[in-house]
Amino acid sequence: MSKSKLEYIWLDGYKPTQNMRSKTKVEENFSGKLEDCPIWSFDGSSTRQAEGGDSDCLLKPVAIYPDPARRDGYLVMTEVLNADGTPHASNGRATIDDNDNDFWFGFEQEYFIMDRKTLLPLGFPVGGYPAPQGMYYCSVGGRNTHGRNLVEEHADLCIDAGLNFEGINQEVASGQWEFQLFAKGAKRAGDEIWIARYLLDRLTEKYGYYIEYHPKPLGDTDWNGSGMHANFSNTILRTCGSQETYEKICEAFRPVVKEHIEVYGEFNDQRLTGKHETASINDFSYGISDRGASIRIPIITVEKGWKGWLEDRRPASNADPYKVAGRIITTVKSANIS
């Protein structure tokens, strides 16, 4: 008789930024298949998802990955349901309108590695600042590169878990890093970002670090903030070969700036200032190879004859990828291009 450890992971009901929660279910003779993961329950009154007098919420497994850090372990991403089986109000995944997986997403997740003792990003001295930005981006060597051991271990865990992990690099600020994930299907893309975040957060427990997803953790200073750039395409964007079509889709984003910003992450106004490779939160723009635009049209897309993808640079590092993807899909479909 074998026993497996299934780590059920879900998003709580905190607003506007949800947190990951998880607990372990031990199953005998588990097949490793998603369809054999049972629905489980939890105390929603402890996660701001129910009242104490009627506190049961359900966890519906939606994706499963091997857990490379635990013996006989699995990572089970779940959706939160009400006791009657309907999606909970906090369940952003259930709102995604992409049942045919026509939409592909590549998320670029930026974050700061923080020292738990000093509460500062790695490389920051107590009571001061390190050398200004410039030498940290894609750097190598102990003077400018901080946290590589954790980042490399995290990459290995993600790859071993079967995530479609595409890369890592140190970012512009000291102690700031990024990883990239790609998936065909918005729901799967969101699943993989959350699992990758879970593995990263759990890994910090043994390093004495924690991960800061705040989009501007260093406040009103001349240090970059953190985003979660959303690269996206559908069949039209991948095949149309038309600048006019691309511009029409971009224009569909202009009248719904508020709706996008509402789901693009808390404190994003501190990051989207028009400085540090961002567009102002109050404006909307798009442009070829323009990292100061709201939406960047990659030069590769143009060089391939307007066949490729777009990059929305506005989502913050703490945004929910489910909600970001869901909103982008709604807006692209509103362009009514077939």
Image: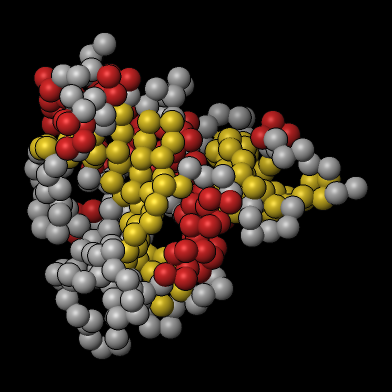
In x, y percent, where is residue 51? Answer: 56, 47
Query: Farthest residue in the right direction?
Result: 1
Observer able to see residue 71: yes
Residue farthest toward the bottom in the current orientation of the protein: 127
Q: Nearer the viewer, residue 49 or 284?
A: 284
Is residue 330 visible from the viewing direction of this image?
A: no
Give the residue drawn at x 28%, y 46%. 229
Say which of 285 and 165 sits in front. Answer: 165
**Colour scheme of the picture:** secondary structure
**Residue 283 percent location from the top left of the image:** 9, 42
Number of marks present in the image shown = 0
Q: Nearer the viewer, residue 318 or 206?
A: 206
| Residue at 38% from the left image edge and 83% from the top image edge | 118
From the viewer's perspective, is 292 left or right of 191? left
Spot the residue most to the top: 338
Q: Is residue 16 left or right of residue 52?
A: left
Q: Is residue 325 above or below residue 75?
A: above
Percent of width and height locating residue 147: 41, 72
**Would you place residue 152 above or below residue 238 in this image?**
below
- The structure residue drawn at horizontal position 31% and vertical position 33%, both measured from the top left corner, is 232
Q: Which part of the image, by quadrant, shows the C terminus?
A: top left
Residue 72 x, y percent position in the rendering: 74, 53
